[in-house]
Amino acid sequence: MCIRDRYKEDWESATRAAAAGGVTTVVGMPNTDPVIDRPENLELKFERGEASAHVDFQSYAVVTSENLDLIPDIDAVGPLGFKIFLGSTVGDVPPPNDGEILEAMETIRETGKRLGFHEENGEIIDHYTERFKAEGRNDPIDHSHSRPVIAEQEAVERMITFAEETGAKVHMFHVSSGSAAEAVARGKERGVDVTAETTPHYLWFTEEVMREKGNPARIQPPIRDADEREKLWEVGIDEGAIDTVTTDHAPHTPEEKKVDDPFGNTWDAISGFVGLETEVPVMLTFVDQGRLSLEEWVRRHSARPAQVWGMYPQKGSLQVGTDADFTIVDPEREWTLEDADELHSKNCVTPFIGESFTGKAVTTVVRGEVVYEDGEVVGDSGYGTRVAVDETNDIDGV
């Protein structure tokens, strides 16, 4: 099922994986080829999605030092929102400086859209990365320790302070630590319009996975130690600092992930792994274990993301007249992800290989049409459509 007929993921393969994973709407990140940093690139991405997607879709656009003046033109094409990469990340999209970020916030505030961040302090990361390389520290766990919690926490605090100054709506992607979740909570308490997400791998694993599975588990921000994971649960999930649970799907090749040499030089490996087909079983397993209720998971998986990003109630609700999107699950099915070839993406490396779950998506319905059933993707390529965005959407009190 894992198809490697071309180098990297496209809308067809990504949304095929989404359908199989019980995900009815996919939002693409902007560090793609081409980078979504100008109107024509976003238009091209939407055209390709309309031609080949199995489920509904949207995309973020990126903000860099080079395209500040293009933000209104990009917004006119209709992205879900904007994103800034703080510090190094896959694709080497350079971050704007702090003055440019403030300017971007002011411009994006006028569009009504939300601005999200890959929130890591690049200077801290660069310092420790170069130091570790010079010392010959090249194990997978060294990559994790080169990106300490303070790099994430500081970036969250700084962006919340900027948002407080400018009045911009901001979002923290893939929060990996309880300390960063605490920073989000403090921002919410101050009245800043800040939302945040985490991912199943930060809730499931600890950094010991780097010693057990090596570079296939390499991701940015890295998976944290047990204390930070527990605090992420307590502050982020139990106390509500984290609004949504998402995937951070990144379909890199086995060669890029160093699957044949998982404990080799980590600086030669790439960060990220697929997640569209493991989010539902991971979170259902937590439901089965009593870590959160089914209703609370559904809210963070469906309703809340749609509210945060201006897709509600057309997405994330079952109100009369809205899209009939359903995920039917078997909450009692016990199973183990034995092999990457069970997945539907391109390049299916994930540290969840070998993990056991209770719960599985069995049927996926998008706008009333079955797109996945009985272990097969049955929907047509090109059925998916771009989701409209209501930037006036008010999420207060929802």
Image (cartoon, rainbow, N blue to C red):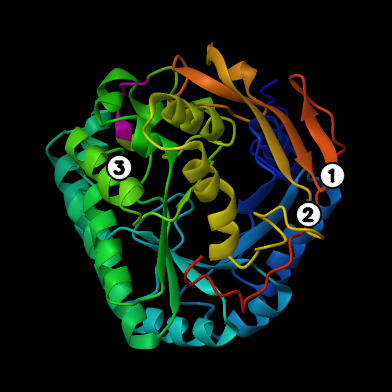
Compared across the picture, whether 136 is left or right of 373 comes to left
Residue topped by disc 1: 368
Residue 5, placed above or below residue 68: above
Secondary structure beneath label 1: loop
Q: Position of residue 135 (x, y in %)?
A: 11, 38
> Residue placed at 31% from the left, 73% from the top?
160
Instruction: Let me know if residue 85 is in the magenta part.
Output: no
Going by the numbered disc 3, the residue's amino acid type is: Trp
Compared across the picture, whether 31 is left or right of 259 comes to right
Question: Which callout, 2 or 3, points at the residue further toward the start of the chain?
Answer: 3
Question: Which callout, 2 or 1, points at the residue further toward the start of the chain?
Answer: 2
The magenta segment: 262-266
Q: Residues within 10 Å of mark 1 (few under 14, many from 20)?
A: few
Residue topped by disc 2: 323
Any part of residue 88 in sight: yes
Going by the numbered disc 2, the residue's amino acid type is: Asp
Secondary structure beneath label 2: loop
Mark number displayed over residue 395: none
Q: Quadrant of the N terminus?
A: top right
Tag 2–tag 1 contact (CB < 8 Å): yes
Spatial distance from mark 2 to mark 3, Cα to Cα? 32 Å
Any part of residue 31 in sight: no
Q: Position of residue 94 (x, y in %)?
A: 42, 65
Q: Residues within 10 Å of mark 3 (few under 14, many from 20)?
A: many
Residue topped by disc 3: 233
Residue 122, quarter of the rendered image = bottom left
Q: Which sits in the foreground, 221 or 231?
A: 231
Q: Which sits in the foreground, 301 or 130?
A: 301
